[in-house]
Image (tube, coloured by chain):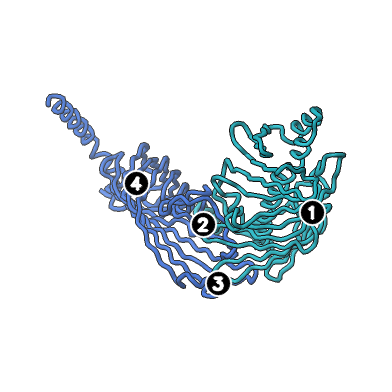
Amino acid sequence: MIITLIALICISCGREERGKLTQKGKEIHDSWYNASRQMIENDVIPMFHLDVWINTDNEDLRRLIEDRYFPYYRIREDGDNVFTIYNGANKIFTINTYGKSLKTNGSNWLVTKYNTYVENRGDLPIFLNSYSEGEKLHISKSNDQWLIQMDSTENQGCYCNLYIKSLSNEGVLLFSENYYTLSGNGMYIYNQNGLIKLKFDITETISRKWVSEFYFHEGAVEFEAQKTNYENIPVKAEYIDKEHFRLTYRNITEVWEYWESSSSY
Amino acid sequence: MKKFLISFVIVCMALGLAAQDAPSWKQELPRHDVYLGIGDPLVAGVLTDRVVFFSKCGGLFTKCSEEYIPDWFAVDSYSKGLFATPTISIGYQYRLAKWFWLGGTFSYTGFYEAKFERISNLKCSSYNSHLITILPEARFSWLNKKIVTMYSSIGLGMAIYTDDTYYSDKFYTTKPRNYDETFCGLAFHLTAVGIHVGKKWYGFAELGFGNKGIIQAGFGYNFNSKTKSNQ
């Protein structure tokens, strides 16, 4: 009896479900999404709040900005229009404003980020994996939107040209909430057992206009992953609403809910 | 030197005392034991990295792996299941003293797994693995009755692991179609408690840890035993 029981128990284990067919496409999309959103919301949008802090004499407003947007940081003015943001003793950003406010046409800020902790992760572009400097961004005003440029010579081959516009304005504070539209294109480079180039093109303007932790709410992006000696991988993401997006990978289209994770991870 | 001589004398006296019981247990209890058992393949699966409990470290024959790095250009595959045989063991034990046995076990566990490419659902790779264990063992029986014996044992030996992997040409252009590997390593088994029930033919069950599994059960035969009935 016991022998039979043990024999039956030992037959099979470790079954995986086939799951959604576009899981690899979702991995590719998620890696671009996480890097881009991190760059926009953690590195670019805070610069608009810093812009108000720099150009106001109102101490109450300065304190409000420090408490709300830089609660764990210190802002130091280094002279010659250069500012540094610290987290404890760690330098996080160096910003050169060249003497112009971001609200001024013709402004062109240079933002340099410093990575204090880096993991060796193949799902993040290499400008986020650098052990010293992170990305170098140029932010300039162009009519009613801003151009975020990443130069490939300054970012280990990665580049982008993204246009961002705020969807939330509270008086003098632009991007008071993380609501914005995004358009443009670029290329990120990843290190996954060899270098991979991920070209992206926002074919329909993306927007983020609700309080939601996951994904964008409308718009579309097309990607192409390239690796030497391999066939290119095309991927397309179309954001349907705040809970769903449609993903096309190797000519197969599936709808994903924001909470689903790809089992490949 | 004095201490050594005193210890030697004490051991000889103990063996002498044991020898005085020899005639009674040799007549009443069996001396040869052969058995066939099956156990779970869990420990064998962990040792051969077929069953992964820890995300980074594999089994006896593999190194701890680096942090997971995704590979978008790797074949996207999934497994329909890992199939494993139970651990089948055959062994022999010879009773040297009423409480002490020496012998060995030969065990086998087999694994099979096939992976399928996610979109086409075609088989892209598979492997057949075999773990063979040769284990000299010492058994210590602490309850020795005519029908029931309870014991613990320890074994240390060698394991041979062979892995025969197949890669489909359709999905893998750089890997060889068939890839065979053989590894040797240390094998061990510790039986915390085991029980035999029966006279000549008996059933047994064991609880322990090692290459033979955690739970083992089977049957065996005691032969050439010089019991009172044979005299």
Q: Give left or right: position of B181 versus A69.
A: left
Quarter occupied by residue A198: bottom right
Q: Position of residue A148 (x, y in %)?
A: 72, 53
Identified by mark 1, the residue type is: Ser
Residue under circle 3?
Answer: B171
Closer to the eye: label 3 or 2 = 3
Categorize mark 1 by other alpha carbons within 10 Å: few (<14), some (14-19), many (20+). Answer: some
Q: Give left or right: position of B181 versus B29.
A: right
Quarter occupied by residue A225: bottom right
- Labels 4 and 3: the sequence-earlier one: 4
Point out the image quarter for the C terminus of chain A. Answer: bottom right
Residue under circle 4?
Answer: B155
Give the residue drawn at x 78%, y 38%: A52
- The reply to whether the C-beta atoms of the residues labelled 1 and 4 are less than 8 Å apart is no
Note whether A259 is above or below A229 in the view shown.
above
Identified by mark 3, the residue type is: Phe
Note whether B48 is above or below A230 in the view shown.
above
Q: Are marks 3 and 1 on the same chain?
A: no
Please state which of residues A98 and B182 is positioned toward the viewer in this rendering: A98
Identified by mark 2, the residue type is: Ala
Give the residue drawn at x 77%, y 34%: A65
